[in-house]
Image (cartoon, helix red, strand yellow):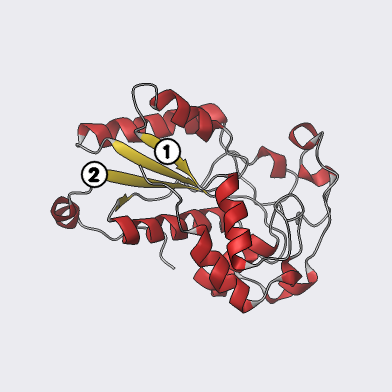
Amino acid sequence: MNILPTTTAAEVATQAARVAVIPVGSFEQHGSHLPLSTDTIIACAIAEAISATYGLFVLPPIPIACSHEHAAWPGTVSISSATLHRLLNDIIDSLRRSGVHKVVIVNGHGGNYVLANVVQELSVDGPDVVLFPGRDDWDKARDDAGLASSGHEDMHAGEIETSVLLHVAPEAVRPNYRQADSDGTDRRKHLLTLGLQAYTQSGVVGRPSSLTLARARRCSTASSSPSAST
């Protein structure tokens, strides 16, 4: 899939969308079977699906964000939460000057905690900015797709992320995903201070071997269905 929009200025003018979508991903390890850009690919797939349904203006993704818990693995690159906060504020200010006052931030990486603060601060005068998908949305997607694992046991590079990529970008998934299962469910207290390396050697927390292609298709569809729009 192409993660960069190919829309022209003339097409944007004709569309006259009142809501913009900003996909935010990451560039971090996802085991040996998924690419560093996994979260960005997922965020873009969700953003494209939302746009197709509601006629929204899709922006290019922010492909590097807050992945400090993955720093022990080669290839992971992060920016500070302050940088991500400022970048989004600048983008949203620019959109407002061009007449687009409502924004959906599509988050593909659970470690981008600062996005909730961005939405909170920019919604003081009204709900003009929303964050999607949230934990409840992912839980619903799991239920709708009939996935075998829960959100806690399938935290990273597991069944749900591998399912979505197999559907939207199958060429990016390495064939060893069925041998990539890893348990890291004891991480509750110290993930933020010790990083993910304290709980998994491979970088995976989850069971990608549990997925089926039918579940992968259902999961991709369910994860792109917002329960509410701006």
x, y percent for residue 28: 63, 50
At 69% from the left and 76% from the top, the residue drawn is: 175
At 25% from the left and 58% from the top, the residue drawn is: 7
Between 21 and 135, the one nearer to me in the picture: 135
At 46% from the left and 58% from the top, the residue drawn is: 225
Q: Quadrant of the N terminus?
A: bottom left
Quarter location, residue 207: bottom right
Q: Which element type, helix, strand or loop, lies under badge 2?
A: loop
Quarter location, residue 54: bottom left
| Residue type indicated by callout 1 | Val
Q: Quadrant of the C terminus?
A: top left
Between 170 and 133, the one nearer to me in the picture: 133
> Above or below — where is 22 with respect to 121?
below
Q: Can residue 187 be seen here?
A: yes
Task: Categorize mark 1 by other alpha carbons within 10 Å: few (<14), some (14-19), many (20+).
Answer: many
Report whether 123 appears left or right of 172.
left
Q: Which element type, helix, strand or loop, lies under badge 1?
A: strand
Q: Can residue 109 be seen here?
A: no
Q: Which mark, residue 18?
A: 2
Quarter location, residue 119: top left
x, y percent for residue 218: 55, 70
Report whether 148 appears left or right of 78.
right
Report whether 149 appears left or right of 63.
right
Q: Which residue is mark 1?
A: 130
| Residue type indicated by callout 2 | Arg
Q: CA distance from mark 2 to mark 1?
A: 14 Å
x, y percent for residue 99: 19, 36
At 49% from the left and 66% from the top, the residue drawn is: 221
Between 142 and 120, the one nearer to me in the picture: 142
Q: Which mark, residue 204?
A: none
Report whether 215 appears left or right of 130.
right
